[in-house]
Image: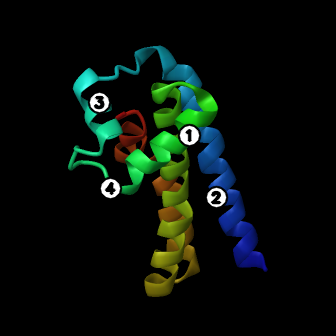
Amino acid sequence: MKELTTVIWLTLSALIFRVFLYFLFANEIVVGADVTQMSILGLNTYWTPTYPILLGIFTIFTKSVVQSAVIISIIAATLIVPLTFCLVKQSYGKQVALIAGILAIVLPHFINSMFDI
């Protein structure tokens, strides 16, 4: 139960941090027309096949491809944190997993990939 609480706190912290960064840097998000169009068509090899499907589903509700891409990026970047915690805990223990989870929250690569839409 205590481990589940830790995972929930890490996930919520990551979500709050990423939403805060989105609102802080929302004006600096630049969407390339080619990348967005290729993602919609499912022709971009950078994204997994589920990305265009999720993009289409979220676009039905938000009516904006860019807003849908931001929501998907925030959710995906947030879910990396509990995944990192669980994988590191299996190999190295809970203390190292907690440090890895905290680092996953603030790691610049995960933050930059969140804004790569």
**Mark 4 / mark 3, whichever is N-terminal:** 3
**Mark 3 / mark 1, whichever is N-terminal:** 3
- Counting the numbered discs, the total is 4
- Mark 3 highlights which residue? 37
**Mark 1 / mark 4, whichever is N-terminal:** 4
Q: Looking at the picture, how far across and down is residue 60, in whole percent? A: 58, 35
Marks 3 and 1, how far apart in space? Answer: 16 Å
- Disc 1 crowd rating (10 Å Cα; few below 14, some 14-19, many 20+) is some
Marks 4 and 3, how far apart in space? Answer: 15 Å
**Residue 28 versus residue 44 in the image, above or below:** above
- Mark 2 highlights which residue? 10
Q: Is residue 73 visible?
A: no
- Disc 2 crowd rating (10 Å Cα; few below 14, some 14-19, many 20+) is many
Marks 2 and 3, how far apart in space? Answer: 34 Å
Residue 43 lies in quadrant: top left
- Disc 3 crowd rating (10 Å Cα; few below 14, some 14-19, many 20+) is few
